[in-house]
Image (cartoon, rainbow, N blue to C red):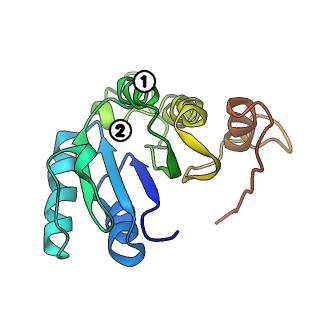
């Protein structure tokens, strides 16, 4: 990442990735989360770390961050309409499986395999990522069949095979 690179942090939570990109790399960062509480926490963390927050997404300059409480599906439509593209998209969705009969908070529901949010988010990335850009998805893998990694397969489908996918098992 170079100064001025445009970064979108989806599922920003505490804002750690967004804050790092703005502080350490001088990027123009947009951090979004469906949880209002997470956005408040991210803003507080940014201020604690000496970052200047901006109140409008379009006002973000190098080394700044804007945090928004948004639904990523609606937000990505708005971004596509504006032609707003990012150099880096970070996906950090919930990945704990949601058991039948359990009704978690909306920002924590990940479906029976823990992959629902990731699959949904990765489908949106090709429309908002610059050609040559990078998407980093932090996701637990759920192997449905021997030798198959669901998250990697979802990325290949979303980009219709027009991407390089690297998988790191941590």
Q: Mark 1 — residue?
A: 81
Among the 4 quarters of the image, the one containing residue 156: top right
> Could you tell whether 86 is left or right of 146 in the image?
left
Residue at 17%, 54% in the rendered image: 54
Residue 158: image quadrant is top right
What residue appears at the point 52 percent right and 37 percent down from the top-left corner?
128
Please state if 51 lies on the left or on the right of 92 as rendered.
Answer: left
Q: Give SS at disc 2.
A: helix
Q: Earlier in the sequence, mark 1 or mark 2?
A: 1
As displayed, is residue 29 above or below residue 123?
below
Q: Residue 33 in the image: x percent, y percent?
A: 30, 42
Residue at x-position 42% and y-position 64%? 4
The residue closer to the viewer here, 6 or 142, is: 6
The image quadrant where one finds the C terminus is bottom right
**Mark 1, secondary structure of its residue:** helix
Q: Estimate how packed mark 1 is, as few (under 14), some (14 to 19) or many (20 or more) residues with alpha carbons within 10 Å.
A: few
Question: Badge 2 is on which residue?
Answer: 108
x, y percent for residue 84: 44, 38
Marks 1 and 2, how far apart at CA: 28 Å
Residue 75 pos. (x, y %): 36, 29
Q: Residues within 10 Å of mark 2 (few under 14, many from 20)?
A: some
The circle on residue 52 is none
């Amino acid at each position: 990442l170079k100064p001025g690179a445009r970064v979108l942090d989806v599922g920003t939570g505490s804002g750690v990735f967004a804050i790092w990109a703005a502080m350490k790399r001088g990027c123009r960062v947009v951090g979004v989360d469906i949880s209002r509480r997470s956005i408040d926490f991210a803003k507080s963390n940014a201020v604690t770390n000496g970052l200047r927050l901006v109140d409008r997404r379009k006002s973000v300059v190098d080394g700044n961050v804007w945090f928004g409480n948004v639904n990523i599906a609606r937000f990505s439509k708005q971004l596509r309409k504006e032609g707003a593209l990012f150099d880096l998209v970070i996906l950090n969705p919930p990945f704990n499986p949601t058991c039948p009969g359990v009704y978690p908070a909306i920002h924590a529901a990940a479906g029976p395999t823990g992959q629902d949010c990731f699959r949904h988010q990765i489908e949106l990335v090709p429309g908002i990522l610059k050609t040559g850009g990078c998407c980093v998805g932090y996701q637990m893998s759920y192997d449905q069949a021997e030798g198959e990694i669901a998250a990697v397969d979802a990325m290949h489908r979303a980009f219709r095979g027009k991407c390089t996918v690297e998988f790191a098992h941590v």
